Amino acid sequence: MNSPTATDASGRRLRLPRPGVVLPPVILVLLLLAVWEIYASTIGPGPDVLPSPSRVAERGWADRENLMLNTWPTLRATVIGLLLSVAVGFGFAVLVDLSGLARRALLPVLVVSQTLPLVALAPLVIVWFGFGQFPKILLIVFVNFFATTLSFVEGFRSADPDSVALLRSMGAGRWRIFRTVRLPSALPYFMAGLRIAITYSVVSAIFAEYAGAESGLGVYMQFAKNTFRTDLVLAAVFVTAAVTLTLFALSFLIERIALPWAFLIRAGEADR
Amino acid sequence: MSALRISGLDVTLGGLPVVRGLDLHAEPGEFVSILGPSGSGKSTTFGVLTGDVQPDAGEVSIEGQALNRKASRVAYMPQRDALLPWRTVLGNLTLGLEVRGTKRGPAREKVRPWLGPFGLAGFEDRYPAQLSGGMRQRAALLRTVAQEQPVLLLDEPFGALDALTRSQMQRWLEQMWEQYRWTVLLITHDVREALFLSDRVYVFSPRPARVSAEVKVDFARPRTPDLFGDPQFAALEAKLLDQLLG
């Protein structure tokens, strides 16, 4: 099937998303919104309990200044938390990759860290570190570093043994092999891990804000709920989804620019 | 002085004797093939030459000098092309020179003149995923040649190709070798490939590997596929197959 194509700076064909990929989910979402709209404005329980999507949009827009003011702290904590999760995950993964002892010592501890109940921990973190950005970021890193560590570990392990043998035959040392073969091999795995981390990050930021913060979408939702403004709660939910989707799309854009070869391989597999 | 000489080589891997008392040599500008059953220790022998495998005993010398792990003097081509997908063709070709200490710019200038003869001109900025199987194999061979080492080690270079591309590549390699006369040690289990390309063929025994036969192949060069119809070729092929099947 042909897809619309454009050409990037170096003259390579650049595939735009196919209509067959984008259209079905968009139509489904529009359909669900339509059903909700009709239900809410006819036999629904009334706008105070279940406002229609159009009402949510209208009220959200009216309160946009306040909404934006609370979006920024969430977005900032999410992005900083993500970057730190990646850095921590990379550090752990390099340790695990280079040293068998580190692997045996670290991996079980990382698994245990994932069994701790976040619901109980979040309020404690707030008690320890206050209502600022720091506890939010800490929680995001805590939720995500495991996934980013594993995606790097998997990625390093995916390095082609033939390529490693080739480098060794040229007299390459450990560090040279790491940065020439193992690290680039890990990047597509890392991008996949990053996308999982993006969805978790936004949710954990809001969760941390729910547990206690000065500002943020979580704080906004809680305040709206306490004043029985279901329309504003839902408006904040939509903003959350929009933020997550934007970060998600951004990750694909970064991958397309930074790892053009990964797309070529995927396109080649799709053609086969 | 031989380009490569192995004498009395013993290798044990995981308690299993893989190579026992192996002797072989390659003279400068000679094309030598190793034929052997699967798992007979051919690749292990290459592993010793590339510094990947530690032998128990034996001597290996290249141009009269003992093997040095740090300063490898062989250029190795693995079974699959092992082109790095994130490097362009040119980036892959300069890899060996870069690892051996040449700066990227001079390495590129060194490789460029080879692009034409290897049929890669105009493709230097592509990624490996954009090349055909034959082109990938030619790029992998050029990456090997470009390292400018005294001995080329080719480990079943055409094993993963389809039959047609494979015979095209064999003919192409024969022509290239005519022209440049590299010292080549080729692993294969294709008897015809070994006979078509080589000056001399070693047959390895089943594990533990030693040389069970050594055959001189003195068909005139340049060789063409007509050679496959030569009764002498057929006789030699039958003899080697017999030797291989024990």
Image (spheres, rainbow, N blue to C red):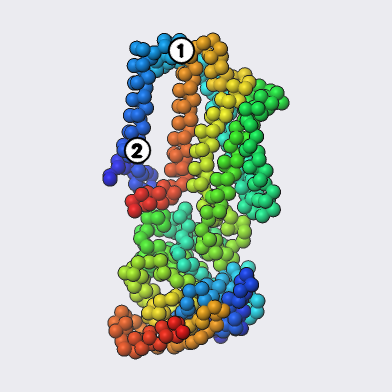
Mark linked to residue A21: 2
Which numbered disc flags the more N-terminal residue, 1 or 2? 2
- Name the spot of residue A41 as percent of width and height, x first: 36, 12
Front residue (pair B230, A113)? A113
Residue at the spot x=58%, y=45% of the render? A150
Q: Is residue A151 visible?
A: yes
Q: Secondary structure at mark 2?
A: helix
Q: Between marks 1 and 2, how big is the CA–CA gap?
A: 35 Å
Q: Is residue B108 above or below residue A95?
A: below
Which chain letter goes with mark 1?
A: A
**Quadrant in which residue A56 is drawn:** top left
Q: Is residue B216 above or below residue B83?
A: below
Residue at the spot x=41%, y=57% of the render? B128
Q: Do the residues indicated by labels 1 and 2 lie within the same chain of the protein?
A: yes
Mark linked to residue A49: 1
Crowding at dot 2, Cα within 10 Å, few <14 / some 14-19 / many 20+, comes out as few
Residue at the spot x=59%, y=81% of the render? B20
- Of the 4 image quadrants, the one containing the N terminus of chain B is bottom right
- Name the spot of residue A180 as percent of width and height, x first: 55, 56
Which chain letter goes with mark 2?
A: A
Q: Residue furthest right?
A: A128
